Amino acid sequence: MQALTPEPISLESGLWEGIESSTLHYRLLQIGNDGKHKFHSVAISSALRKGKTYPFTNDDVNCTSTECFIQFPSTNDNAIRLVITPYLDSSYKVLEIPTDNNEQPLAQTTYQLDSAKNGSAVSHFLNTYKNPIIKSLVKLNSDNEITGLWVGRLVMDNKPQLLSFAVYPDQQSNFTLHLNGEVFVNSTTFMVTDISEHRSVIHIETKHPTFANQLLINRLGSSQLRGYMYSKRKGQTLQTGEFWLLRIE
C-alpha cells in the first residue's frame, strides 16, 4: 500500500503580529489574497512610528507539510529568512535568520505572531498615542523623574506583549497592556500620590482590582525602566509579569 504524501501547509491571509523581544521590535506579517505580501519590523523605541517594510510574493514562499520558508528579495541590507510553523489555532512560531552579504547566518531569533482578526495592538496603540499626545508627554521627560511616555514589553506566561506607561505629574497616569490581535487592552491607573520610593526601588499601587495593582520598578539610567508587576486581591497573587520600558524622546 502506497503511503500518502502530506499536503503542504499554506500561510493564511490576514495580519499577524508579535514582539521580537531581544531588540524590542514589533513584527507584523501581512498576507494578501492577491499573492502580494509584506513583512514589517517597527521599532518600539520610536513609539511604533519608524521601521522597515519588506515586500514579497508567493514566489518567495516555499511550504512543506510542517513549515513555510520565506526568503525576502535581496536589498542593500542584510537578507532575512523566516521559518514559520503553525502554533495552536491562531498563531505562528517564527525563526528569523538574518544573513550577511555572503549568505552566512547571523544571530537567530524566535518569536510568536498572533492573528489580528479581532484587532491589532499596533493599530490600537497608534490610535491612542497620536503625535500631539506623544509630544505633550515627551515635554514631561526628566532625568530625575519617571514622568513622560515609556513603551516596551510585558512578559506574562513566557509571552511578550506591547506595554505603554504614561506618567503625568498632575493627572491620572496609566499602565496599559496592548494585547496582540485584540481591540481591547488591560489597563490600570494611578496618581503621583500612589508612587513611593525606597532604596532606589519605585513602588506604585494602582487602582485596578485584578490587573497590575502592584508595580516595582528599577531605573536603568534616564532612558530605561525594568520592573515587575503583580496582581493581588484579598491576599492572593493572581498573576505576575516582568517588563522592560524605553523612554520615548
Image: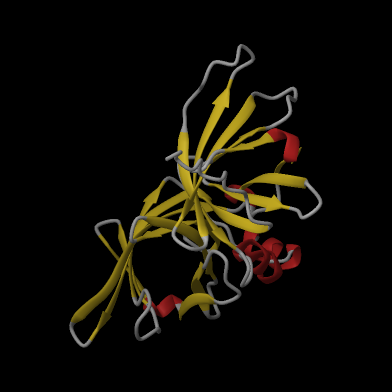
At a point 46% along the width and 36% down the height, the residue shown is 109
Residue 151 pos. (x, y %): 54, 57
- Residue 130 figure quarter: bottom right
- Residue 81 figure quarter: top right
Residue 8 pos. (x, y %): 57, 44
Farthest residue toward the right?
Answer: 34
Is 240 located above or below residue 234 in the figure? above
Is 105 located above or below residue 63 in the figure? above
Farthest residue toward the top?
Answer: 102
Q: Is residue 112 visible?
A: yes
Q: Nearer the viewer, residue 208 or 18?
A: 18
Q: Is residue 217 visible?
A: no
Farthest residue toward the left?
Answer: 235
Is 204 located above or below residue 67 in the figure? below
Residue 219 pos. (x, y %): 38, 52
Q: How is the image coloured?
A: secondary structure
At a point 63% along the width and 68% down the height, the residue shown is 117
Q: Is residue 46 left or right of residue 196?
A: right
At a point 63% along the width and 70% down the height, the residue shown is 119
Q: How many marks?
A: 0
Residue 33 pos. (x, y %): 77, 55
Q: Is residue 96 left or right of residue 34?
A: left
Is 93 located above or below residue 191 in the figure? above
* Quadrant in the picture for the N terminus: top left
Q: Nearer the viewer, residue 87 or 180?
A: 87
Farthest residue toward the front?
Answer: 1
